[in-house]
Amino acid sequence: MKKWEEYIRKVTPYVPGEQPKNTDVIKLNTNECPYPPSPAVKEVIHNINSDKYRLYPDPDATFLCGAIADYYNVDSDRVFVGVGSDDVIAMAFMTFFNSDKPILFPDITYSFYDVWADLFKIPYETVRVDDDFKIIKESFDRENGGIIFPNPNAPTAIGMPLEEVEYIIKNNQDSVVIVDEAYVDFSDCTAMDLIDKYDNLLVIQTYSKSRAMAGMRIGFAIGNKKLIDAMKAVKFSYNSYTMNMPSIYAGAAAINDKEYFEEIRDKIVNTRTKAMEKLKELGFSMTDSKTNFLFVTHKTKPAKEIFEALKEKNIYVRYFNKDRIDNYLRITVGTDAQMQALYFALEKILGK
């Protein structure tokens, strides 16, 4: 090892779902929306004056923050935007998790949390979900330097009722509590209803799932002005121009098209219901999904074998080689046609 190599930061990176180079596949492994974004997005990008591309974007993303604020009926100075919710969460980690006390998050959850904690040298402890993969609200009743959990959780797809979410926030008012709502639009519970009640609450959402804009990288946080101002100070100390100009205008157009958003969300929820019934007929059991994916296990066929057999048929789902969930698959809800292809392939694999 050369001397300079001693000073390289050693981290174990987050491993995202595979992005196959071959486009002739059915891609159900990264929870992207199977439908295109609002037509208003295409229109606004097409109409951007090309001269604007030579200029830096607005570092405050004022236009986008204003549109999000109007949608959620909050003041725009209570909105923070970033390059996907991953960027927003990372900024929140850097901003709020600076205690010597460990932060807390579930042991089965979004696998970027421990990566960020290691990267930013934040002490952390995981709290065990129960045998049905449900978060136990009382498990957060201990001293901590902050809390983060998704609702609904991923990869388990399980949602917590609002009263349980509030229990965690209410009993940890000396810490910032972050509720990661990447999949909230497919459920019936949001902590947005609590942001005026608790000044230690930060709610984070994304455009990548229900608004079909994973490629545009737009995420946002809403909380009280002190929290948002603190995050902006960290952002402007790191990179003032994180949000590109087309994303600012496209993001505003997308959130303003409520009718289209509700249309594709409802399609996905309806397909999810049919998929749960069909997969049960094929011998799968699953959690009660409140997301745009299903977390399933088969009664006789190991998950890894199904994963590999589907991949040979150019159908990609997500397999996690991790303790407690290594016999489960995460399957994104696609179009009805994509799901029919999945069922057909599974019938062949399972000998139905």
Image (cartoon, rainbow, N blue to C red):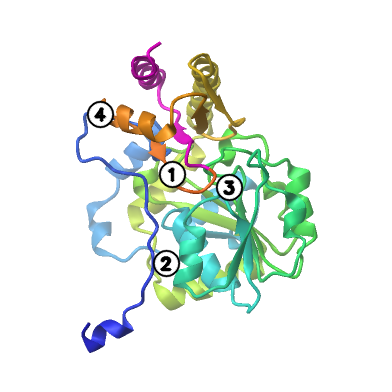
Q: Nearer the viewer, mark 3 or mark 4?
A: 4
Q: Identify the mark at residue 176; answer none if there is no mark.
A: none
Q: Identify the mark at residue 181; answer none if there is no mark.
A: 3
Instruction: For mark 2, give the secondary structure.
Output: loop
| Tag 4 and tag 1, C-beta contact below 8 Å | no
Q: Nearer the viewer, mark 3 or mark 1?
A: 1
Which is nearer the eye, 141 or 224?
Answer: 141
Q: Residues within 10 Å of mark 1 (few under 14, many from 20)?
A: some
Q: Quadrant of residue 147?
A: bottom right
Q: Disc 2 versus disc 4: distance between alpha carbons?
A: 45 Å
Instruction: For mark 1, give the secondary structure.
Output: loop
Q: Residues within 10 Å of mark 3 (few under 14, many from 20)?
A: many
Q: Quadrant of residue 227?
A: bottom right
Q: Disc 2 versus disc 1: distance between alpha carbons?
A: 38 Å
Q: Disc 3 versus disc 4: distance between alpha carbons?
A: 33 Å
| Tag 2 and tag 1, C-beta contact below 8 Å | no
Q: Which amino acid does label 4 sit on?
A: Glu
Instruction: For mark 4, give the secondary structure.
Output: helix
Instruction: Say if the magenta span includes residue 307.
Output: no
Q: Identify the mark at residue 59; answer none if there is no mark.
A: 2
Q: Which amino acid does label 3 sit on?
A: Glu
Looking at the rendering, the stretch of residues picked out in magenta corresponds to: 325-352
Q: Is residue 171 left or right of residue 234?
A: right
Q: Disc 4 versus disc 1: distance between alpha carbons?
A: 18 Å
Q: What residue type is labelled 2?
A: Pro
